[in-house]
Image: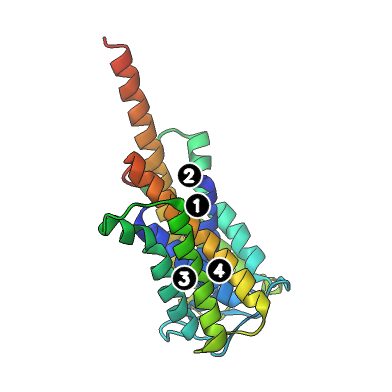
């Protein structure tokens, strides 16, 4: 449920950033049932962003908030840079301002959701270990 | 789910429906720093929907899922019916706009308020 919330939130943040920020034009706009380029792009980038914490947790137990933030920044700046060279997606980055703003806004949203997930997992581990200690006192 | 997260989520869902939902039209597309009517509409409906459970909690009223659902239902469908009658930059052009827009916004608002209520009952983790 937590992962779904994070995924949903990240997709909506990407959609919002592409539509509302100056310097980014959505040329092939989604109007359901017509599927433009903006919605698939939002879903893909939302998936990548919401996977940061689960992947870090899977491969490395010593993750921190700084590491999550750095990965979110690198991921989003890289994806928007790739977007600049793939005009067929239907989203045009028309200025450097648009590139930086969109990457930053999406990175902040991604950091926030992953940070909340991290805090929740730490809280859960803490309560489990406290419970375990109280059941088996040394 | 805390209030800020719920507010953001409700706002973003209304914004998404305004832009991508069938039967909903925006007359002027604005980019930040100009605030368009869709952002204003999303902010108002998002704020109202996210504030249902906090409102109950502040007034110390008895909360039931039926009451939460009913108020969210009235706000969500009421908002889309209102812009069908009085368009102010965002308008609903057919019945699908009200039905799909209202249902998606209502479902999100109900889930966020219900989760806030459950978390409040269990005294859940502070950051969730």
For the residues labelled 2 and 1, the Cα–Cα distance comes to 10 Å
Q: Secondary structure at mark 3?
A: helix
Front residue of A110/B116: it is B116
Q: Secondary structure at mark 1?
A: helix
Q: Work out whether B113 lies above or below B79.
A: above
For the residues labelled 2 and 4, the Cα–Cα distance comes to 21 Å
Badge 1: how crowded within 10 Å, few (<14), some, or many (20+)?
Answer: many
Residues flagged by tags 2 and 4 on a common chain: yes
Q: Chain of mark 4?
A: A
Q: Chain of mark 2?
A: A
In which quarter of the view is residue B23 placed?
A: bottom right
Q: Work out whether B70 lies above or below A36.
A: above
Which residue is at a point 58% across and 53% down the rendered structure image?
Answer: A47
Which residue is at a point 35% across and 39% down the rendered structure image?
Answer: B122
Provide residue B111's location: percent of width, then percent of height: 49, 54
Badge 3: how crowded within 10 Å, few (<14), some, or many (20+)?
Answer: many
Q: Earlier in the sequence, mark 1 or mark 4?
A: 1
Residues flagged by tags 1 and 4 on a common chain: yes
Q: Secondary structure at mark 4?
A: helix
For residue A72, say whether it is visible.
Answer: no
Residue that carries the numbered disc 2 in the rendered image? A53
Residues flagged by tags 4 and 3 on a common chain: no
Residue that carries the numbered disc 4 in the rendered image? A15
Residue B75 disc label: 3
Provide residue A32's location: percent of width, then percent of height: 69, 72
Front residue of A90/A71: it is A90
């Amino acid at each position: 449920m937590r992962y779904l919330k994070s995924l949903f939130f990240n997709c909506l943040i990407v959609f919002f950033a592409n539509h509302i920020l100056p310097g980014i034009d959505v040329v092939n706009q989604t109007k359901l049932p017509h599927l433009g380029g903006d919605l698939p792009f939002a879903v893909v980038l939302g998936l990548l962003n919401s996977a940061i914490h689960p992947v870090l947790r899977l491969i490395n137990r010593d993750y921190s908030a700084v590491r999550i933030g750095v990965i979110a920044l690198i991921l989003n700046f890289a994806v928007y840079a790739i977007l600049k060279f793939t005009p067929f997606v239907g989203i045009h980055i028309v200025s450097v301002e648009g590139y930086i703003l969109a990457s930053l806004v999406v990175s902040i949203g991604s950091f926030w959701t992953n940070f909340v997930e991290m805090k929740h997992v730490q809280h859960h581990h803490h309560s489990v270990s406290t419970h375990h200690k109280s059941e088996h006192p040394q | 789910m805390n209030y800020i997260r719920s507010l953001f989520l409700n706002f973003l869902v209304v914004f998404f429906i305004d832009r991508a939902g069938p039967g909903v039209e925006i007359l002027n597309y604005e980019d930040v720093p100009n605030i368009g009517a869709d952002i204003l509409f999303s902010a108002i409906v998002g704020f109202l929907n996210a504030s249902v459970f906090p409102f109950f909690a502040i007034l110390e009223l008895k909360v039931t899922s039926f009451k939460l659902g009913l108020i969210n239902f009235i706000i969500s469908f009421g908002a889309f019916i209102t812009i069908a009658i009085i368009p102010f930059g965002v308008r609903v052009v057919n019945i699908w706009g009200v039905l799909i827009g209202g249902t998606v916004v209502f479902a999100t608002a109900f889930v966020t308020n219900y989760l806030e209520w459950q978390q409040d009952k269990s005294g859940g983790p502070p950051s969730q």
